[in-house]
Image: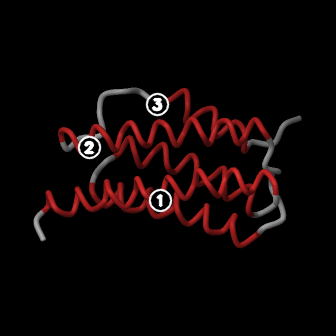
Amino acid sequence: MSELDIVSEFVTESSENLDRFDRNLVELQKHLADSEMLADTFRTIHTIKGTSGFLGFAKLEAVALAGESLLGGVRDGQTRLNPEITAALLVMVDALRQMLGTIAANGADGNNDYRELIGRLRNLLAPHS
């Protein structure tokens, strides 16, 4: 399998995984105690993060890592899933989709700066005084 094939497969699988992530997030709003669905949602973003790092897509990896950390906090009971967190995770999904589209088109994760989104995701996990 060539590098192009690997990247193409990554883009396809990640896009499908983000579709599942979206569905899970909607269901989690209705069933906050569904630990299996939360674990599946976490694994989805964890897989995207890990593979993007392996393939050298640093921006994609950084955004996914921030989302993974936030979901890990929800999973571990450090924070509760709420509309603000859900909205931020949906923005994250949009950013990941945008980067996947850029990767599919030109093999790189783009020139956009996601520091604000990463900061937003991190701040939602941080304990509030």
Q: Amino acid at mark 3?
A: Tyr
Q: Amino acid at mark 2?
A: Ile
* Left or right of residue 48, residue 42 in this image: right
Q: Amino acid at mark 1?
A: Asn
Residue 114, numbered circle: 3
- The residue that disc 1 covers is 17
Alpha carbons under labels 2 and 1: distance apart: 16 Å
**Quarter containing the N terminus:** bottom left
* Left or right of residue 32, residue 68 in this image: left
Q: From the top left corner, tell me how far across and down residue 12 is, in percent.
A: 32, 57
Q: Are marks 2 and 3 in contact (CB under 8 Å)?
A: no
Secondary structure found at label 1: helix
Q: From the top left corner, tell me how far across and down residue 68 is, in percent.
A: 58, 54
* Left or right of residue 90, residue 95 in this image: left
Q: Is residue 101 above or below residue 44?
A: above
Q: Is residue 6 above or below residue 106?
A: below
First in sequence, mark 2 or 3: give its number.
2
Q: Are marks 2 and 1 in contact (CB under 8 Å)?
A: no
Secondary structure found at label 3: loop
- The residue that disc 2 covers is 103
Q: Quadrant of residue 128?
A: top right
Q: Is residue 27 above or below residue 86?
A: below
The 10 Å Cα crowd at callout 1, few under 14, some 14 to 19, many 20 or more, is some
